[in-house]
């Protein structure tokens, strides 16, 4: 068995590579990365002891992929993961589309050429922003909680949103590129008889993540709090009540292992893969956790909301549990504590994030 991972030197890609290597010791794992993100070289060095080979290249360039040795599966973990991409002045809209969508086209052509399976690491941000923003909320224990009327919306449950929740635009330029990639992947799979899975993930988090304010928020918040860096609640009256769930990449790896082992076990190809309500918390609750762990630190506020801010986004992964007998094994408290210890041991981690 040969597995090829795009974006293999990112936090998710490298974590999946190590997790799958440990779980599938007879599997040959390799990958490609453009090495432009902060931490790429650190992760590249960390993969060497596992015998995992890394090609320096860019999935946007078809020529970088032409001479690669065929694999049985491709795991696509290469993407610009920021919901602000394309409008934040750091990445142009064209660059975002080239990376997240045209890169997918090149990967799909590899799958066709190799007759191999594909697993796309997608995102919860494919779900409709207006639909999420219009969910009825109350506040409980410094966190938004959906109220009963929200449960009448299709795909909405008190355990999180399901795969049936609306994906109607707008979903952000980032979300649109991921949703389009999902659609293309499904069509390539049907047209060329290839096994394809799409895993829509919540906030992936863990020690060693180079988190930023618009991505990797759990890691970013804990590292910033530990170093007493400026932090502020944005939107929703500046209270920090907005809620997300977290998931460790090693739990994602355990699901991928099952999908690879049984590629024809189910016709259902698109799944939510998240930590669920039990592994969710608001920014205000995360700050309280940090205060107990590191001591007091003042949090600022900017009450005005941005276009893509949402009050509550928790994934219901019941379908993954029913089909694959999968539930997260690494809980929220372990994820947060692992990040906290990493923050204490690596005082310059935030500066390395900013370099990217």
Image (cartoon, rainbow, N blue to C red):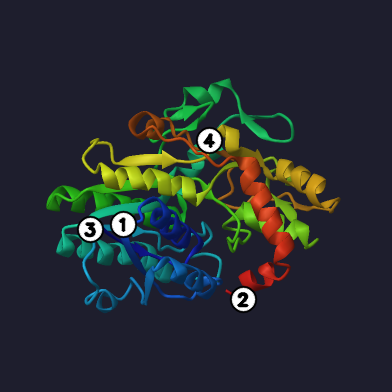
Q: How would you rate the neighbour count of disc 1 (Cα within 10 Å): few for under 14, some for 14-19, many for 20 or more?
A: few
Q: Quadrant of residue 273?
A: top left
Can residue 242 be seen in this snapshot?
no
State the image coordinates of residue 215 (x, y, percent, origin top left): 57, 57
Q: CA distance from mark 1 to mark 3?
A: 13 Å
207 left or right of 66 in image: right
- The residue mark sitting in front, 3 or 2, is 3
Numbered circle sitting on residue 276: 4
Reading the image, the residue beneath label 1 is 26
Q: CA distance from mark 3 to mark 4?
A: 31 Å
Name the image quarter holding the C terminus. Answer: bottom right
Q: How would you rate the neighbour count of disc 3 (Cα within 10 Å): few for under 14, some for 14-19, many for 20 or more?
A: some
Say which label, 1 or 4, has the lower sequence index. Answer: 1
Q: Nearer the viewer, residue 222 or 175?
A: 222
* C-beta proximity under 8 Å, tags 1 and 2: no
Reading the image, the residue beneath label 2 is 355
Reading the image, the residue beneath label 3 is 72
Say which label, 1 or 2, has the lower sequence index. Answer: 1
- The residue mark sitting in front, 3 or 4, is 3
308 left or right of 305 in image: left
180 left or right of 288 in image: left
Numbered circle sitting on residue 179: none
State the image coordinates of residue 266 (x, y, percent, origin top left): 25, 35
298 left or right of 189 in image: right
């Amino acid at each position: 068995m040969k597995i090829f991972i795009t974006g293999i030197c990112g936090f998710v890609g490298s974590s999946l590579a190590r997790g799958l290597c440990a779980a599938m010791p007879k599997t040959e794992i390799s990958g490609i990365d453009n090495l432009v993100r902060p931490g790429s070289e650190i992760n590249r060095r960390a993969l060497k002891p596992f015998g995992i080979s890394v090609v320096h290249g860019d999935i946007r360039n078809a020529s970088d992929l032409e001479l690669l040795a065929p694999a049985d599966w491709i795991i696509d973990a290469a993407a610009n993961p920021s919901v602000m991409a394309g409008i934040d002045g750091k990445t142009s809209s064209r660059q975002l589309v080239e990376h997240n969508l045209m890169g997918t086209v090149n990967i799909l052509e590899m799958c066709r050429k190799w007759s191999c399976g594909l697993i796309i690491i997608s995102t919860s941000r494919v779900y409709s922003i207006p639909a999420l923003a219009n969910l009825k909320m109350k506040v409980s224990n410094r966190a938004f909680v959906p109220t009963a009327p929200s449960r009448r919306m299709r795909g909405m449950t008190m355990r999180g949103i399901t795969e049936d929740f609306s994906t109607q635009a707008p979903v952000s330029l980032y979300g649109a590129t991921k949703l389009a990639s999902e659609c293309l992947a499904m069509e390539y799979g049907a047209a060329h008889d290839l096994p394809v899975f799409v895993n829509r993930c919540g906030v992936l988090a863990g020690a060693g993540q180079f988190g930023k304010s618009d991505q990797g928020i759990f890691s970013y918040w804990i590292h910033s709090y530990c170093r007493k860096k400026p932090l502020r609640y944005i939107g929703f009256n500046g209270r920090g009540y907005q809620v997300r769930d977290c998931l460790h990449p090693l739990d994602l790896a355990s699901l991928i292992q099952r999908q690879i082992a049984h590629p024809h076990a189910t016709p259902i190809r698109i799944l939510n893969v998240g930590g669920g309500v039990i592994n969710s918390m608001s920014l205000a609750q995360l700050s309280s956790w940090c205060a107990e762990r590191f001591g007091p630190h003042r949090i600022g506020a900017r009450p005005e909301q941005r276009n893509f801010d949402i009050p509550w986004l928790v994934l219901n992964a019941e379908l993954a549990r029913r089909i694959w007998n999968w539930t997260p094994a690494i809980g929220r408290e372990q994820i947060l504590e692992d990040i906290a210890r990493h923050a204490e041991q690596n005082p310059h981690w935030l500066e390395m994030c900013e370099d990217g």
